[in-house]
Image: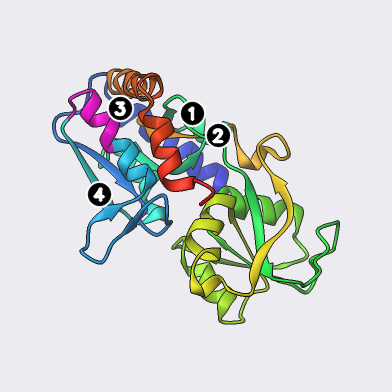
Amino acid sequence: MKKNLLASLALSALLFGTTAVAQNPITIATDATFPPFESIDAQGKLVGYDVELMQAICDEMQLDCNIINAAWDGMIPGLVSRKYDALISQLTVTDARRRIMAFSDIYSHPVFRFVGHQGEQYDFGPDGLKGKVVAVQTGTPMDAYVTKYHPEATIKRYDAGSAAYLELTGGRADLHMSYEAQIIHSFLKTPQGEGYALVGPRLSGQDAPEFGEGVAIALNKRSTELLASINEGLARLRANGKLDALDAKYFSAD
């Protein structure tokens, strides 16, 4: 089923792609259920690391950008069909995704972790999670990893990035897997995270291909001029220190 979907999306990418920068305003979709990377604040405004990064790129390159919230499961099909011009939502770069969309230069290399009850012992070896319930966001690297390496576990999948924490704190899941930074800054540092801790190994794309090469902005495969503009914007933010400042703002040890 996944292979058929990828093949269909790849064909659509060729049919709907363009070579020029998208008409203004450029529409960029993000799944705003994954703080601190992207979420909606009390005033209904899109906020977060990825939102600020994308806006900074657009400002640097004088692009007229409209960043919008979108459902995770419709983002990639929406990009292929040209409903969206770009996606920024902590998208990891994998071979399967490269077949249906293009990526900017990588802007971060995340670490992936499990989170569970503090003080409880977990066995992450073969068959070690048998009988455990693991919550993940569907269609993510975490979903792919747990499905492949811990098939003996009961895997619960959710569309929203924050829904799994409700299952964890509600006692309906034993473990959740996500980006380490996301677990720390959106859960463990909140009152809801009391009594929970990072558990198991620190994992990256070097440990399992499911975690990809790093995180980048996704575009239609034929949006070559927009891709060049975004990469130029990223390069400028690295050179002028704004990318480092954004990292420090969201992920400092304090």
Closer to the N terminus: mark 1 or mark 3? 3
Residue 102 found in image quarter? top left
In the rendering, which numbered label is found on residue 17? 3
- Front one among 45 and 7: 45
- Residue at numbered disc 1: 106
Crowdedness of circle 2 by 10 Å Cα count: few (<14), some, many (20+)? Answer: some
Q: Amino acid at mark 3?
A: Gly
**Could you tell me which secondary element the residue under label 4 belongs to?**
strand
- Residue at numbered disc 2: 214
**In this orientation, does residue 151 appear?**
yes
Closer to the N terminus: mark 4 or mark 2? 4
How many angstroms separate mark 2 from mark 3 (CA)? 24 Å
Closer to the N terminus: mark 3 or mark 4? 3
Contact flag, marks 1 and 4 (Cβ < 8 Å): no
**In this orientation, does residue 86 appear?**
no
- Residue at numbered disc 4: 68
Residue 252 lies left or right of residue 173; in this view the side is left
Residue 116 found in image quarter? bottom right
